[in-house]
Amino acid sequence: MSNFQKPKFQAATGEHRFKERSVGERRSPRASARMTENQPNRRRENTDFDQKLDKNRPHFSPKSSGKRDENRTPEFTLQVTETQLGKVKVVTKSTGVSAQPKEKKTGPLSPRAPEKIKKNRAEEMKVFGENACFTLFAQRPESIVRVWTTVETAHKTGEMFSYLAANKKVYHVVDRDELERVSGTEHHGGICMLVKKRHPFTLKGYLDITRRQDVVVLLDNVRNPQNIGGILRTCAVYGVKALITAEPELIQSANAMRVAEGGAEFVNILQTNDTEQALSQLRQAGYQVIYTSTDKRAKSLNKLLWTKKTVFVLSESDVSGFAKNDDEVVNLNTANPLKTGLNVAVTAGVLLASRAK
């Protein structure tokens, strides 16, 4: 019979499964050898990781003192790659790192170039006033660059905003204080526009077209925007198509257009460099030149015989002394008890109303 004895097994308990090694306890030789063999690999892995950090982070080094290296100032540049896939062109944009310093934009192509700003100021102007702005939108909407309105006026601008959105133009709904800062006046009427200016025509080009009947107005040293706006409005009411001036920028001022209530959109601006030369050209074209005066000896307006083509010379002062032999000098009312006449804008209304009879 065999002497084999069955071994006794002790059941594992929680305290024997995970036994902590004391500080003084030595590891087995085989375990120490395995750790020694793996340590170089771990150090090599850490070194590779540090090199990757240095490569992928150009702005700083993980081991640096925290100060940015002034000699290394990388700039990001946009790289565009185009690939043709059949009939479709695929454009890929990526941002790379460039050691070249970024060049500052200058010259006429820069959005902030002084030349471009100066050009925009010369070609653009602001228009405010409800009737002026809505009439401009009805006549030449393509000239609008930007629009500001108040909340109270926004409910009237639905069609305008739809047009601006469809043509990728900007509009803003702001409060009255903001609109006052934008327009530069408290008389903005709830709306302000930035628009392209109209280019004035030349008097010579206008006279090259033969007309059997015509009425035009020539402004001589009229600089008040309120008067200019009133004249524009009166001209539009009576169907006058042309206004002659040596200073077209005064005609296209924001205050003059506001007072005109949209009348500026129906009157062409004829520019002349010399008023006397312009009157000479008009006389040669067969126009009757008419001045106004407060002199009691002047002809009464009621006795004036009208010709088919007429030009009214309007001024804020009495310029009847410059009249030539064939010109007409009239008094609006010989019974006037005042030493002065009417306001130049009111005078325009009286003359045009008499001519329209």
Image: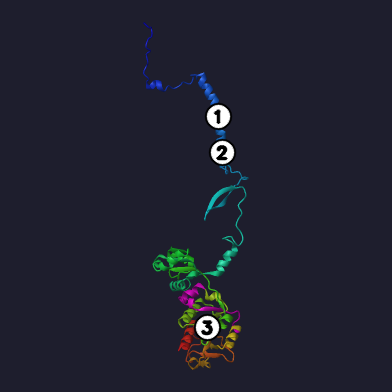
Quick one: label 2, few (<14), some, or many (20+) residues within 10 Å? few
- Residue 79 forms part of the magenta stretch: no
Residue receiving disc 1: 41
Q: Residues within 10 Å of mark 3 (few under 14, many from 20)?
A: many
Residue where numbered disc 3 is placed = 217
Name the N-terminal-most of marks 1 and 2: 1
Between disc 3 and disc 2, whose residue precedes?
Answer: 2
Please provide the residue range marked out in magenta.
253-276
Q: Which disc is residue 312 wearing?
A: none
Task: Determine whether the residue tagged by mark 1 lies in a helix, strand or loop.
Answer: helix
Q: Residue at x 59, y 63 (%)?
A: 114
What amino acid type is highlighted by mark number 1? Answer: Asn
Q: Is residue 79 left or right of residue 139?
A: right
User: Closer to the camera, 10 or 336?
Assistant: 10
In front here: 237 or 78? Answer: 78
Magenta stretch: includes residue 260: yes
Alpha-carbon distance for marks 1 and 3?
A: 97 Å
Which of the two discs, 1 and 3, labels the residue nearer the N terminus?
Answer: 1
Of helix, strand and loop, which one carries label 3?
strand
User: Residue placed farthest to the top in the image?
Assistant: 1
Which amino acid type is shown beneath numbered disc 2? Lys
Point out the image quarter for the C terminus.
bottom left
Asked whether the beta carbons under mark 1 and mark 2 sit within 8 Å of each other, the answer is no
The residue pinned by badge 2 equals 52
Q: In the rendered image of this protein, does residue 247 appear above or below residue 23?
A: below
**Camera sees residue 56:** yes
Q: Quadrant of residue 206?
A: bottom right
> Where is residue 150 drawn, in percent x and y?
42, 66
The answer to whether mark 1 and mark 3 are in CB contact below 8 A is: no
